[in-house]
Amino acid sequence: MTDLLKRRMSDQRIMGIAIALFLGAVTFVLIVRSPISIWNNSEILTDSSVFEYIAFGMQQGEMPYRDMFDHKGPLLYVINYIGMLIQYYKGVWYIEFIAVYLTCFFVYKTARLNCNRLACLGTVIICATLLYNYYEAGNLSEEYAMPFIGIALYIFLDYFLNRNISKIRLMVCGFTAGGVCMLRPNMTALWIVFSLAVILECVQKKKLRDLSFFILYFCIGFFVLVLPLLIWLVVNNSFTQFIDCYIDFNMIYSTGNGGKEVMLRRWEAVLFFLREPVTVIAFIISGFLCTTKRRFLDWTYIIFLLVTMVLIILSGQQFGHYGMILMPSVSYSISYAMGWFEKKKRSLISAAFLALLGVIVIPVWMALMRQFVGIYEHRGKSTISNEVAMVCQLIKDRTDEDDRIAVYGNWNIIYILSHRLSVSRYSFSSPKALLPSIEVEYFEELRMKKPSFIVIQNGRMDEIMEAFLEEYKYQKIWFLDGIAIYEKGDSNA
């Protein structure tokens, strides 16, 4: 009997290791496409370059919000700062790997509430197809929110299905809520909907003592993450600017600054995110559960999916990476279907469902594997564009490390690869489209500090910049494909 027990334990360990390796392989295939993966040496995209620039500035003693404008949460900059400590420019990819791996693991754990191991792995494969179009080169706030959502969703579901709850789970649930709040607040649908569901259930069943217990330990976990970040901002005189950027600016950004076409943009955004068949299937399955099972959990879950979609499309922007959080979010409904398929193997409906999933999923993974092989073949080769390389080299040759420069446009990769800080708090000029006062403040800083170098991104030259360059007699020293570099003459000293 002892030997049999040992064999079973050994088999379980082997199975656990095999599953862990499988999830690691899935994660690697999904995010090896990053410009800074271990096989790549390319340029990070626009948003990621802003986050890495802020991390670079933090290394030089600058503070987010106070010295460097952006409107994401402070946790995102801390993550990028840790990435910079691991390895300059490329280190944050390892944190991305952990984030996506944890997401896959908790998609698997959520699926285990409905089906066996093989079907759980199938659920991971299906849900992961959403990242094919939504990943968008990575290092984005949604990517780091995914594991928080996956962990909390599992805890909530396990509570409603099996009544499994503990102090540790409550604190972890609060911790994950705090993490997402410190990334971007419009990804918090899970905690809004499921927390209200828990409160309603406790009130209905007159379990007020349990409710107070839930709230206490949830709040402990929440503030364990949030309080240190807020204290850090207060101590470094950055809290007021944090409120301006993270709360006030985001309220304007999320509403599209008004306008007659905001509802049309939101509707178009809904259609954009529903182009993914897996998302549509998840909604259909959830709706089916509500009409057949009619459980409190099923209604809570579909409301959660709907609120998630509303928050994603609130700004009316069709940015694919907004949809990354749908990967853990749809895991429960997809796994329920997989569990049903297990029980109805010989059913014509289950065979049709499996065929439908195959038509949807197999082409995506074939495309992912094609990309994977192509990246492997070109591993180690630098694909930094000639324009970026030449601009950064010129800056390094003509300026000292302590000199500050201006890059006019949304091109923070120049700061990062040239190891130079922005002369202005606004390292990128795009926010002026929403707040014209930013443009005024930006040019006031330029007039006061007169940077030694000004780089104009292709297509970003405008009348106000032309007037500034003429007024202070900047000389054009380099021009290529619409990119221009201007240098401050001695007369401007």
Image (cartoon, rainbow, N blue to C red):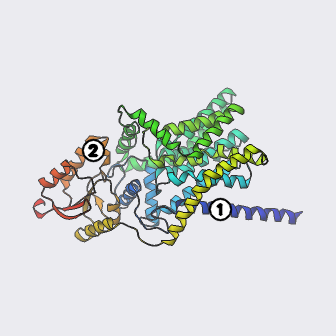
Q: Is residue 139 above or below residue 182?
A: below
Residue 403, position as x, y percentages in the image:
24, 63
**Amino acid at circle 2:** Ile
Q: Residues within 10 Å of mark 1 (few under 14, many from 20)?
A: few
Give x and y (percent) for residue 418: 31, 66
Q: Which residue is mark 1?
A: 22
Quadrant of image for the C terminus: bottom left
Lateral position of residue 134 relative to residue 429, left or right: right
State the image coordinates of residue 421 (x, y, percent, origin top left).
30, 60
Mark 1–mark 2 contact, CB under 8 Å?
no
Q: Is residue 390 visible?
A: yes
Q: Earlier in the sequence, mark 1 or mark 2?
A: 1
Question: Eyeballing the image, is 379 above or below 44?
Answer: below
x 64%, y 47%: residue: 168
Q: Quadrant of residue 470?
A: bottom left
| Closest to the observer, 401 or 349 | 349
Determine the residue positioned at 70% across, 46% down.
Answer: 352
Q: CA distance from mark 1 to mark 2?
A: 48 Å
- Residue 211 rendering spot, x and y as whole percentages: 64, 34
Can the viewer see residue 297 in this picture? no
Label placed on residue 258? none
Instruction: Give the labeled residue for mark 2.
Output: 438
Q: Secondary structure at mark 2?
A: helix
Residue 477 vs residue 429, the one in the foreground? 477
Q: Residue at x 42, y 50 (%)?
A: 232
The amino acid type of the residue labelled 1 equals: Phe
